Image (cartoon, rainbow, N blue to C red):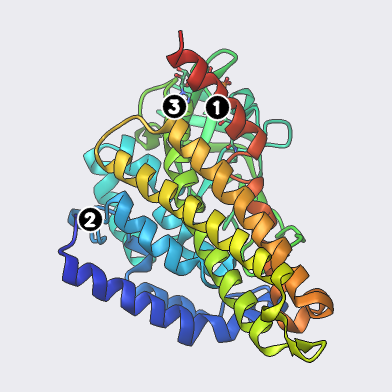
Amino acid sequence: MALDQDTYDQLIDTITRFVTERLRPLEGQVAETDEIPDDLIEEMKELGLFGLSIPEEFGGLGLNMTEEIGIAIAMGHTSPAMRSTFGTNIGIGSQGLVMAGTDEQKAKWLPKIASGEIITSFALTEPSAGSDAASVKTKADYDEAKGVYRLNGSKRYITNADKADLFTVMARTGGEGARGVTAFLVPRDLPGLSVGQPERKMGQQGAHVCDVNFDDVEVPAENRLGAEGEGFKVAMRVLDRGRLHISGVCVGAAERLIEDMVGYAGEREQFGKPLSDFQMIQAQIADSKAECMAARALVEQTAKKRDAGENITMDCAATKLIASEMVGRVADRAVQVYGGAGYIADYGVERFYRDVRLFRIYEGTSEIQRSIIAREVMKAGG
Ligand code: COS
């Protein structure tokens, strides 16, 4: 444990109350305005949410993975866009720096990331490099005379890019393939860096994704993260843990949907009795609960393995596959249990249905998770 049990229990309790009392009532407003209110962001900062996974010496809470997962599940009980507000700071936007940064880089950036003073983004995906992440084309040419890498290219679907102050950018310094990729810490205010308009999306309104363009952006050599050619591996390690975190959010969202389903089925009457008296409705609740419990157990087991220092690449892929597919089925059943109301915006279930669709796509599609699992299993089998 990074925290003692009492402190951790109090933290979970505080976050659960924040989710229930502050965030859930604002879900509709956030979806409609596509913005998280500023005062809410300030409250998230005060609660320490931007620094959950940042080591204590740099001002964060230094949670281990098991503890972080507990919070991801608690946050999953409200619209995923709420968690996304600080999701990049505690995940893909900061963990490359935590894993591969120098002491100077960490001291310079991590305290401000932990406090939420600066927002971070992870820039891997490109217009022609999605699942095939090792094919990134953004170039980083070293200019020895100036001591800078000159970045040219563009990134796509970058979460929180419009708010970001610091990007972890994967760019090509060498030949083709994974070994030619290097990671860089790129401050937003460098000349030549521009961010596009937020995309219109199916769901998760309030969380924005944008293009990020680099036009002769001169990045000081001291901002290189790790050695040349190590950037792809850094990105993969960051994604391993990101996939586990997302799996926790999937479990939380499923728990919320089950709670909503049960509530609605108990209130709504048809044929003279509540929906919950019908076995076909009970079956949908039972299947959802059983699948959610299984996913939760897997998430917790994988988090424990990571905390024990084990290689979790396959476990994370399997966990994300199971948890994201599970929440998709649960959301679909929730819409079905709500019937006509499930299709009406005011009830919020259709919004969750759209929101959770992304979990099967981002941080690696279900197809990519399956190919990682197959590859790792076959490797282990010789
Ligand atoms: N941890 C550490 N190292 C890893 C790794 C991991 N999880 N996965 C791969 N590597 C290493 C490999 O060991 C290999 O190292 P060597 O060159 O020393 O042998 C190197 O990275 C290249 O790996 P590999 O050959 O497996 O790369 P591929 O091009 O086959 O790609 C997948 C592998 C498909 C797994 C990768 O491209 C991927 O995850 N794609 C999805 C990307 C994604 O999730 N995008 C979402 C957007 S980001 S929010």
For residue 372, which numbered disc appears in the image? 1
**SS label for mark 3:** helix
Contact flag, marks 3 and 1 (Cβ < 8 Å): no
Amino acid at the residue labelled 2 = Phe
**Quadrant of the image for the N terminus?**
bottom left
Task: Say whether mark 3 is within 8 Å of ligand 1.
Answer: yes
In front: mark 2 or mark 1? 1
- Residue 318 is situated, as x and y percent measured from the top left of the image, at 51, 37
Q: Return the disc, 2 or 3, that comes first in the chain's sequence.
A: 2
Q: Return the disc, 2 or 1, that comes first in the chain's sequence.
A: 2
The residue at which mark 2 appears reads as: 58
- Residue 175 is situated, as x and y percent measured from the top left of the image, at 56, 12
Work out how far the residue at label 3 is from the one at label 1, CA to CA, in angstroms.
14 Å
Is 183 placed left or right of 269 in the picture?
left
Work out how far the residue at label 2 is from the one at label 3, CA to CA, in angstroms.
24 Å
In front: mark 2 or mark 3? 3
| Crowd around label 2: few <14 · some 14–19 · many ≥20 (10 Å) | some
Q: Return the disc, 3 or 1, that comes first in the chain's sequence.
A: 3
Q: Residue at horizontal 53%, vertical 27%?
A: 373
Amino acid at the residue labelled 1 = Ile
Work out how far the residue at label 2 is from the one at label 1, CA to CA, in angstroms.
33 Å
Amino acid at the residue labelled 3 = Lys
The residue at which mark 3 appears reads as: 233
**Quarter holding residue 2:** bottom left
Q: Return the residue nearer the eye: 117 or 3.
A: 3
In front: mark 3 or mark 1? 1
Is 303 placed left or right of 233 in the picture?
left
